[in-house]
Amino acid sequence: MSSSKYNPNFTDNVINAIGPNAEPRTRQVMSSLIRHIHDFARDVELTVDEWTIGTQFLNAIGQISDAKRNEGQRISDVLGLESLVDEIAHHLMLESGEIPTSSSILGPFWSPRAPFRNNGESIIMSPHEGQVSLMHGRVTDLVTKKPIAGAVVDIWQASSNGKYDFQDPDNQVDNNLRGKFRTNENGDYHFYCLRPTPYSLPVDGPAGQLLRILDRHPMRPAHIHLMISAKDYKPVTTQIFPSNDPYLSTDSVFAVKDDLVVDFTPFEGDAKAKLELVYNITLAPRNISDKPAAKHASQPATVEPVRSNL
């Protein structure tokens, strides 16, 4: 008689039911997933009622999702899974200890339709109650430290009411607070945007229900999204956060990293902007590999930023 409380062969039987033609990676991922799910159920001694609630919860995620709302991704964010996958996928450190600009989660609000704009233009297209800021910086090579000309800086952000353009068609035109900019021959970019505003995740669906059950708030710290790419370089998708935001340490999707915290400073001499943000970006060559060492969390930058020439 087995000393196990439950059938010791059950999980192996389920895993072994995977057919011989399954792709090797599919077999690896699903075998591990099945084993962890079964171990979880045994560990907490999941009840039938709890299992039923869980399946209904999964159904609700699909039912509320549509072309403009990705509740599945939001649940993943609330559980910290997207941030963890991002760390696994994008970690890179040189032997010297230097790292490229840290990545962060994509989130559900990126759009492939953002227009290219000229350096010096504004992404602000609709009325707002925010603070206009001049954002500028330089994109450089992690290894050579040389500027990267022709890099694409794709930016998007919520308006001062905490909503993105396609969430707010009554108040914002399409592609408000979105744009793509190419760096010049010195690797520099500059444009006008808003100092970002904190906002709440939507709480009218399963994600809000999960946050309430866990006694957590739904707030995201103010942030600006960036996607930076250049030929022969590894692209970076990231977010940057004002240093005085009250939600930095309790971000509801766990996306904040130390070196992504930035300072907006008072700006004089420009009638278009009251604030300035200098943000320099470092990209790693596509063929570079990580040093053979333990994984590290991103650390604050220790090098003074290079101020770009506007």
Image (cartoon, rainbow, N blue to C red):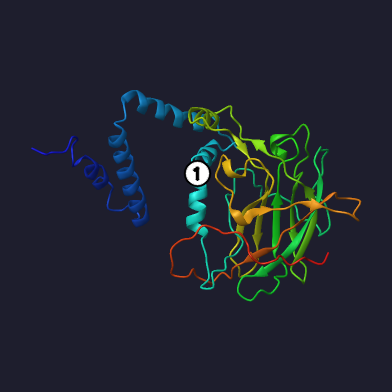
User: What percent of the width, then of the height, locates residue 121?
Assistant: 83, 54
Farthest top residue in view: 49
Q: Is residue 254 left or right of residue 242?
A: left
The residue under the point 55% across, 42% down is 253
In the image, 245 versus 35, the foreground residue is 245
Q: Is residue 211 left or right of residue 7?
A: right
| Rendered residue at 90%/54% (across/down) | 270
- Number of other residues with Cα within 10 Å of mark 1, as a class: few under 14, some 14 to 19, many 20 or more: some
Quadrant of the frame with the N terminus: top left
Determine the residue positioned at 77% across, 65% down.
307
Q: In the image, residue 205 lies at what x, y percent? A: 55, 28
- Which element type, helix, strand or loop, lies under badge 1? loop
Name the quadrant of the C terminus. Answer: bottom right
- Observer-nearest of 67 and 45: 45
Work out whether residue 149 or residue 86 is closer to the camera in this orientation and state it. Answer: 86
Q: Residue furthest left?
A: 1
Q: Please, what is the three-letter code of the amino acid marked with disc 1? A: Gly
Residue 130: percent from left, percent from top:
80, 40
Image-based side of 217 in relation to 6, left or right: right
Name the quadrant containing residue 286. Answer: bottom right
Total count of labels: 1
Give coordinates of residue 207: x percent, y percent: 53, 32
For label 1, the residue is: 80
Residue found at the very far bottom of the displayed protein: 144
